[in-house]
Image (cartoon, coloured by chain):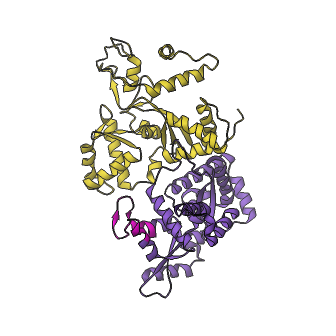
Chain colours: A yellow, B purple
């Protein structure tokens, strides 16, 4: 494993730094591109090894490129995260104090909600109770737009959610700050915000929507994986264009010697 | 007026060590005395390698965050906010920081002002065509900056501000109006670009009414390739870069000295 950083790794890292997060397909294309520009040795399907080389160098700086699943579509992403401070460090240079306070309020609302969303009305109502410096509604709206643009929040029909980048980057922060509120997905063991919850009061486990879809796929009579109570929610469906690709990728990387498995059977067997 | 008096007053009392106050500008010169080599030696023994590595990482992060906004980084700020009690081994740590930037990030940490000790990060990785994910996600301000730097360079390095504003007006960017992408154009150019050290904006002496002129800033000199810029301008005019003898000579000279 004697692999040192080359310019191809540096280009990859810098692109991650300026974009914050990229999806799986982009990451694969970028890997190839970086290797070709610097006539590095490009091995398809070895993206994770390529990233490991970068991560080894980033580790002393408390930075890391991480795989993350989107709560929304279940697709896989790569995010550059900063592990030093548990607070909102990376944001602190880009936003004013009252903007950060608004962000924290939005985060409170989202984490405290049942389904991981907060309405724009509820967030905007916090704007004139800010302690640092009040924001007018109009200003607060612009700030929220900026959070979406900078990929910290997602917005759909006036409902805000924490973005994949935000959850990945602030994983530790969320787990510490909302220790009693936040739950972990029973399937993937990451923070679960946009999710379904078991209604058995003695159980109450959560599962991400894409995890629910994957877990109950093909089962007509869904039961909670923890307490075996009936799972009363509608089982969502996802188009699995990308996750399919990444999964077969994943399994072929694991079972290096085996011939590429036929996708459908291998996917099921992993569960 | 009172501002002026205050500054000169502090300066005259500068030798007093007790004078160190919160103001970044001042405490730099007063507190940053070069330690002797035996002092450095003793200080080194006070810190473990782990501690030094940790401090190096903190400085790297600090500089990266500052660089996001393209704000030049002052030694005084590094010392005050990050280095703190590690100040005696400042040089040691900065050597490691510089090495990290080159080896891990492909960036060069340059001291652009050795009197006031101001650093910038210059990227050694350049954007290329056909990127699946952009190295620099598009920023309209960069386009505007490029236009301004081109005008200055093609006009021989210095231009009066009126020329810049008039040219921008022809491109439908009116410095007097609020622009969709740039906001207050005049402020962006004469304040933000100046603070980032992309351009210099200075008063022409003995003019009445006041007149100002633009030059390239120190960051532009380090970061922007004059040859690439000339090639771009030449392309617009459908000519060879060599047809601008003066500019071509300067551009090739700058290229070989980098």
Which of the two residues, B54 or A16, is positioned nearer the viewer here?
A: A16
Report whether residue B175 is seen.
yes
Quadrant of the image occupied by residue B187: bottom left
Whether B124 is drawn above or below A50: the answer is: below
- Magenta-drawn stretch contains B92: no
The residue furthest front is: B238
Query: Residue A260's x, y, as percent?
Result: 58, 18
Residue A189 visible at all: no
- Magenta stretch: includes residue B177: yes
Question: On screen, B28 above or below A235?
Answer: below
Is the N terminus of chain A in the top left, top right, bottom left or bottom right quadrant? top right
Residue A113 pos. (x, y %): 30, 34
Comparing B22 with A148, the one in front is A148
Q: Is residue A263 left or right of residue B32?
A: left
Residue B56 percent coordinates (x, y): 62, 51
Residue drawn at (41%, 23%) of the image: A186
Q: Nearer the viewer, residue B126 or B203?
A: B126
Q: Is residue A127 above or below residue B168?
A: above
Residues drawn in magenta: B167-190
Where is residue B123? Give x, y as percent: 60, 54
Task: Identify the image quadrant of residue A119.
Answer: top left
Give the residue displayed 61% in from the left and 16% down from the top. Answer: A259
């Amino acid at each position: 494993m004697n692999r040192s950083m080359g310019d191809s790794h540096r280009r990859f890292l810098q692109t991650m730094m300026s974009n914050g997060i990229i999806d799986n397909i982009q990451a694969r294309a970028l890997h190839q591109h970086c290797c070709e520009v610097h006539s590095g040795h490009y091995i398809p399907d070895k993206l994770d090894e390529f990233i490991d080389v970068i991560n080894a160098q980033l580790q002393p700086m408390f930075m890391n490129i991480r795989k993350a699943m989107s709560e929304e579509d279940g697709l896989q992403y790569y995010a550059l995260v900063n592990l030093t401070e548990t607070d909102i460090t990376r944001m602190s240079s880009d936003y004013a104090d009252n903007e950060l306070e608004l962000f924290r309020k939005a985060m409170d609302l989202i984490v405290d909600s049942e389904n991981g969303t907060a309405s724009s009305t509820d967030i905007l109502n916090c704007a004139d109770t800010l302690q640092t410096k009040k924001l007018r509604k109009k200003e607060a709206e612009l700030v929220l737009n900026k959070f979406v643009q900078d990929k910290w929040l997602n917005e759909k029909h006036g409902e805000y959610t924490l973005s994949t980048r935000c959850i990945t980057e602030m994983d530790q922060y969320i787990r510490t700050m909302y220790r009693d509120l936040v739950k972990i997905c029973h399937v993937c063991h990451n923070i679960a915000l946009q999710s379904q919850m078991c209604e058995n009061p003695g159980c109450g486990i959560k599962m991400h929507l894409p995890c629910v879809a994957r877990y109950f796929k093909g089962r007509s009579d869904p039961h909670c994986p923890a307490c075996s109570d009936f799972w009363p929610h509608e089982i969502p469906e996802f188009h699995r264009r990308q996750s399919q690709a990444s999964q077969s990728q994943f399994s072929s990387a694991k079972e290096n010697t085996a011939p590429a498995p036929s996708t459908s059977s291998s996917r099921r067997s992993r569960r | 007026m009172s501002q002026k008096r205050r500054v000169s007053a502090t300066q005259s009392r500068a030798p007093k060590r007790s004078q160190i106050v919160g103001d970044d500008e001042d405490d730099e010169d007063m507190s940053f005395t070069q330690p002797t080599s035996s002092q450095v030696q003793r200080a080194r023994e006070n810190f473990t390698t782990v501690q030094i590595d940790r401090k190096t990482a903190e400085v790297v992060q600090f500089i990266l965050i500052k660089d996001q906004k393209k704000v030049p980084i002052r030694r005084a700020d590094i010392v005050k906010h990050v280095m703190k009690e590690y100040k005696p081994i400042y040089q040691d740590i900065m050597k490691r920081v510089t090495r990290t930037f080159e080896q891990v990030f492909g960036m060069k940490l340059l001291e652009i002002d050795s009197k006031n000790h101001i650093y910038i990060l210059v990227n050694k990785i350049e954007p290329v065509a056909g990127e699946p994910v952009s190295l620099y996600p598009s920023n309209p301000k960069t386009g505007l900056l490029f236009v301004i730097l081109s005008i200055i360079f093609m006009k021989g390095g210095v231009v009066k501000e009126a020329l810049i504003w008039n040219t921008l007006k022809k491109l439908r960017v009116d410095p007097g109006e609020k622009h969709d992408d740039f906001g207050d154009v005049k402020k962006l150019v004469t304040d933000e670009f100046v603070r980032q050290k992309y351009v210099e904006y200075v008063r022409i002496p003995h003019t009445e009414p006041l007149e100002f002129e633009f030059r390239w800033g120190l960051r532009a000199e380090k970061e922007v390739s004059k040859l690439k810029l000339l090639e771009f301008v030449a392309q617009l005019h459908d000519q060879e870069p060599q047809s601008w003898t003066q500019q071509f000579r300067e551009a090739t000279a700058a290229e070989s000295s980098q």
